Image (cartoon, grey):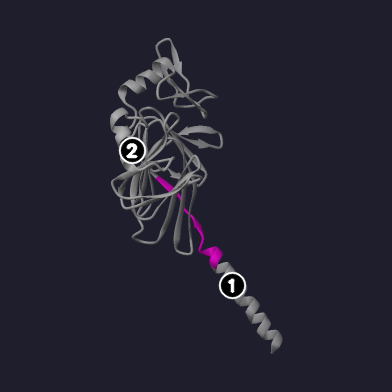
Amino acid sequence: MKNIGSLLIALFVTTSAVTVCAGTETRKVTVESVKGLAHYMAPDGWQPLEKGQELDEKTVVLTGFSGEVVLHFRDDTRVTVKEATRAGIRTFHDAREITTTRIDLDHGGIRVKVDSSMAPNDFRVNVHGTVLAVTGTGGDISWWPDSGMFLFSWEHTWAVTNHRGSRDVEESTATNDELAPPDIIMGGALDTRQGDLFGLTGDEISGLRRLNTGRGVFTVVGDDPTRVPVRGGSVRGGNRITQGG
């Protein structure tokens, strides 16, 4: 009887472990729409993104000056990858009824809308070491080499954490990677547009194309698909960003 009891316990533990593993599912991300120039990193290099395409974890998305991509994760959760942006899907899976999503923003801007109506959603964005965590909310996030990270929350609250500490960003307020108060952030943004809160202006795009300078200079390595030909040469895009004048 003792041996039978031990066997039943062992079977129960094994079955439970299998059930937990079976409950973990890696999901696909659907490309809901594509405007302008947009690519993703495939095993054989950069390839154009197409509407309806399904993306896996560890996928990097890159948009050009005219590009915009809307990624549909699940339910009403969507991430809009704005122009001149490089962002990666690091994690997207379900485990024990919780959806876990991790996005890495290298440069540019994204708009996030997270839906937790069907199940809890652990959704976080990593921006050069600053982690922005959110449940059932939305916001605009950007990072540029001359101004760093900027978050504007347009729905509910974000928890922002980095080596400087942490700050809760309430609806209709903002912060940056220095965790500055929203009044300072918004005042500076309205005065100078520092940080490109609303995307690149026409003058900034022209400056980047013409002079290889401006808010941030995209320099060059390899065959980046977002490079834009101009008179007398081209602006070369790449995986590296340097600061402009």
Answer with the quarter of the image where residue 18 lies.
bottom right
User: As rendered, which of 210 and 63 lies closer to the eye?
Assistant: 210
> Can the viewer see residue 32 in this picture?
no
Residue flagged by tag 1: what amino acid is it? Thr
Query: In the current view of this chain or complex, which residue is farthest to the top?
Result: 232
- Mark 1 — residue? 15
67 vs 96: above or below: above
Q: What element carries label 2?
A: helix
* Residue depth check, mark 1 versus mark 2: number of the one nearer the observer: 2
Where residue 147 appears, as percent x and y from the top left, is 41, 32
- Mark 2 — residue? 184
Residue flagged by tag 2: what amino acid is it? Ile
Where residue 235 appears, as percent x and y from the top left, is 45, 19
135 vs 112: above or below: below
Q: Give the range drawn in magenta.
A: 20-30
Residue found at x 68% / y 82%: 6
Distance (Cα) linking label 1 and label 2: 56 Å
Disc 2 residue crowd, few under 14, some 14–19, many 20+, Cα 10 Å? few
Q: What element carries label 1?
A: helix
Query: In the current view of this chain or complex, which residue is farthest to the right?
Result: 3
Q: Residue 107 in magenta?
A: no
- Count of marks placed on residues: 2
Where residue 66 appears, as percent x and y from the top left, is 35, 28
Dot placed on the residue nearer the N-terminal end, 1 or 2:
1
